[in-house]
């Protein structure tokens, strides 16, 4: 007899693991299918930041920023071994497109959305302290602002979320390659390959958290789901030989004026990210020579004394809704897709590492009408996440 679970989640990135955690915490039986390894794709190729998203204020995404600041504080509280506060520095030069008064207003609003708590405050770094800023060039430097956000190891965080989901009763099947799903008689019949065998399970709710593979997964669901209008955006990072700076530098690319981070990554320095439209198989994604040179030029521009030898690089594909807007200015909210032909089916795309828990709660709100009431086991806002040191 084919086994039954309330919820099947496809995809073991941070969003899929977050949904598995939320579902198990709500008392439901849940299975997560992951084809290769937890956080093996986009969720391991982020900028490693747990932040409110200061730059999203420019495009009016106030709700996203407020939510992200709230979730950042929960993560710092619940995962102190995984999420660490760090100083962020915004250097402004004579040629910088944003003026000091604009940054002042932006950081003031950021602090206001952070409820004016001490950790939400910012300051101008006195000119006498500029020489202490990790070798930042002072040529044409007009002002430096400092505020606080946080950093994490995205792979370890994803594993910790799934570990907590497992402790609450969720089951991870990995490697498990999704083959197809059919909806009939108010249930989904899901076929997947595991241990070189095709296996099946039935579920009431099917969550597609496949990230860049979201449409590939949907092509194998019956009745056929129409393709979701999204685009893939490649983001590349480099890690250079230079020892890690003490803080994170939020700089403007001198060429196209995009925001780029220069940050510590264990004992070295990481720079990212790019935004390049990507077409093709997400499994083949890798940084282009142009992206490597672009990022290297930025760090050499702001930190001319750095050892910019590239130790390694990586790239991931982010999912953004199709739009006429530039990639940099598109909304970063999670997009949920449902289809009347498939009651109980939800595809989720995009979203931020910081807000995975809120995304999972939103997903649960969308599926609760299809599921029986269960006794809640835990509140995800208060689950301690343990670092996996293996």
Image: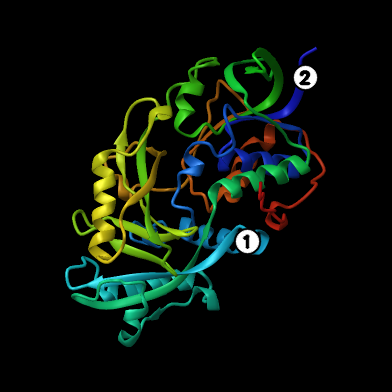
Tell me the quarter of the picture where residue 76 sits.
Answer: bottom right
In the rendered structure, the answer to whether residue 313 lies left or right of residue 218 reads left
> Among all residues in the image, which is located at the extreme right?
375
In the rendered structure, the answer to whether residue 184 lies left or right of residue 43 reads right
Residue drawn at the location 56% of the way across and 46% of the way down: 155
- The residue nearer to you, when weighing 132 against 331, is 132
Tell me the quarter of the picture where residue 271 sits.
Answer: bottom left
- The residue nearer to you, when weighing 120 against 116, is 120
At which x and y percent is residue 173?
68, 28
The residue carrying pointer 2 sits among few (fewer than 14), some (14 to 19) or many (20 or more) residues within 10 Å by Cα, namely few
Residue drawn at the location 53% of the way across and 73% of the way down: 115
Q: Which mark is residue 326?
A: none
At which x and y percent is residue 284?
39, 28
Tell me the quarter of the picture where residue 300 sits.
Answer: bottom left
Asked if residue 90 shows in the view, the reply is: yes
Residue drawn at the location 53% of the way across and 74% of the way down: 119
Residue matched to label 2: 3
- The scheme the figure's colours follow is rainbow
Residue matched to label 1: 74
């Amino acid at each position: 007899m084919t086994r039954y679970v309330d919820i099947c989640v496809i995809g073991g990135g941070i969003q899929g693991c977050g949904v598995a955690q939320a579902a198990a915490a709500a008392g439901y039986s849940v299975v997560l299918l992951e084809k290769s390894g937890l956080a093996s794709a986009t969720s391991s190729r982020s900028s490693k930041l747990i932040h409110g998203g200061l730059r999203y204020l420019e495009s009016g995404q106030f709700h996203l920023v407020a939510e992200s600041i709230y979730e950042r504080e929960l993560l710092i509280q619940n995962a102190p071994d995984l999420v660490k506060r760090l100083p962020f520095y915004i250097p402004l030069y004579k040629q910088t497109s944003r003026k000091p008064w604009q940054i002042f207003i932006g950081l003031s609003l950021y602090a206001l959305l952070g409820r004016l708590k001490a950790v939400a405050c910012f300051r101008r770094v006195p000119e006498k302290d500029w020489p202490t800023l990790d070798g930042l060039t002072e040529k044409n430097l007009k002002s430096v602002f400092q505020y606080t956000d946080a950093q994490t190891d995205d792979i370890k965080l994803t594993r910790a979320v799934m570990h907590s989901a497992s402790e609450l009763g969720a089951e991870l099947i990995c490697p498990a390659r999704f083959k197809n799903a059919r909806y009939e008689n108010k249930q989904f019949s899901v076929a997947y390959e595991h241990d070189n065998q095709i296996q099946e399970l039935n579920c009431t709710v099917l969550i597609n958290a496949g990230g860049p593979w979201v449409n590939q997964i949907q092509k194998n669901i019956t009745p056929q789901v129409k393709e979701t209008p999204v685009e893939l955006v490649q983001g590349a990072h480099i890690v250079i030989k230079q020892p890690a700076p003490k803080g994170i530098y939020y700089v403007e690319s001198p060429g196209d004026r995009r925001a780029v981070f220069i940050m510590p990554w264990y004992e070295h320095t990481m720079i990212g990210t790019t935004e390049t439209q990507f077409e093709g198989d997400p499994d083949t994604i890798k940084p282009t020579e142009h992206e490597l040179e672009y990022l290297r030029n930025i760090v050499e521009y702001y930190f001319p004394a750095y050892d910019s030898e590239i130790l390694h690089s990586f790239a991931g594909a982010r999912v953004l809704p199709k739009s006429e807007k530039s990639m940099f200015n598109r909304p970063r909210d999670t997009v949920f897709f449902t289809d009347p032909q498939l009651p109980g089916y939800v595809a989720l795309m995009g979203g931020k590492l910081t807000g995975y828990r809120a995304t999972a709660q939103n997903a649960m709100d969308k599926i609760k009408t299809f599921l029986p009431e269960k006794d809640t086991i835990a509140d995800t806002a208060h689950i301690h996440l343990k670092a996996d040191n293996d």
